[in-house]
Amino acid sequence: MISSMEHSPMTTRAFGSLMTGYTGVVIAVMRDGRFAFVQLDGPEHDLPMGMRRWMLHWEDLTELPR
């Protein structure tokens, strides 16, 4: 789950208020393991800019129990 947007790239942080609270799946580890490429859950028309995949910093993510 996206819990904050303090550490993610500036282009992603611009959509922070729209993305906080969304859940998704990490599909790749990027930039020497500092970032996660996340595929968000939900219909594309409900996602910010209709984009499903975003690069986020690990510290902005919270793991949900299974």
Image (spheres, rainbow, N blue to C red):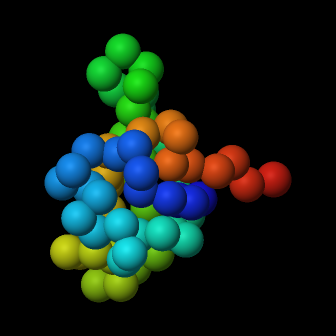
Determine the residue positioned at 39% across, 32% down.
35
Q: Nearer the viewer, residue 4 or 49?
A: 4
Q: Which residue lies at the image location 37% right of the left edge and 77% below the top edge? A: 18
Classify residue 21 by image quadrant.
bottom right
Is 20 left or right of 35, judged from the image as shown? Answer: right
Q: Is residue 14 visible?
A: yes
Q: How many marks?
A: 0
Q: Is residue 41 visible?
A: no
Give the farthest residue toward the right. Answer: 66
Task: Tell me if residue 60 comes above or below residue 45 in the rendering.
Answer: above
Q: Is residue 51 above or below residue 47?
A: above
Residue 62 position within the rendered picture, expressed as x and y whole percent measured from the top left = 64, 50
Which residue is outermost to the top?
32
- The residue at the point 41 percent across, 25 percent down is 34
Q: Position of residue 63 (x, y in %)?
A: 69, 48
Query: What percent of the width, then of the height, locates residue 44?
Result: 31, 76
Percent position (x, y) of residue 33?
43, 20
Question: Is the residue 51 above or below the residue 26 in the image?
Answer: below
Q: Is residue 14 left or right of residue 18?
A: left
Residue at (35, 45) in percent of width and height: 8
Horizontally, residue 21 falls left or right of residue 39, namely right
- Viewer-side residue, 27 vs 64: 64
Residue projecting furthest to the bottom:
45
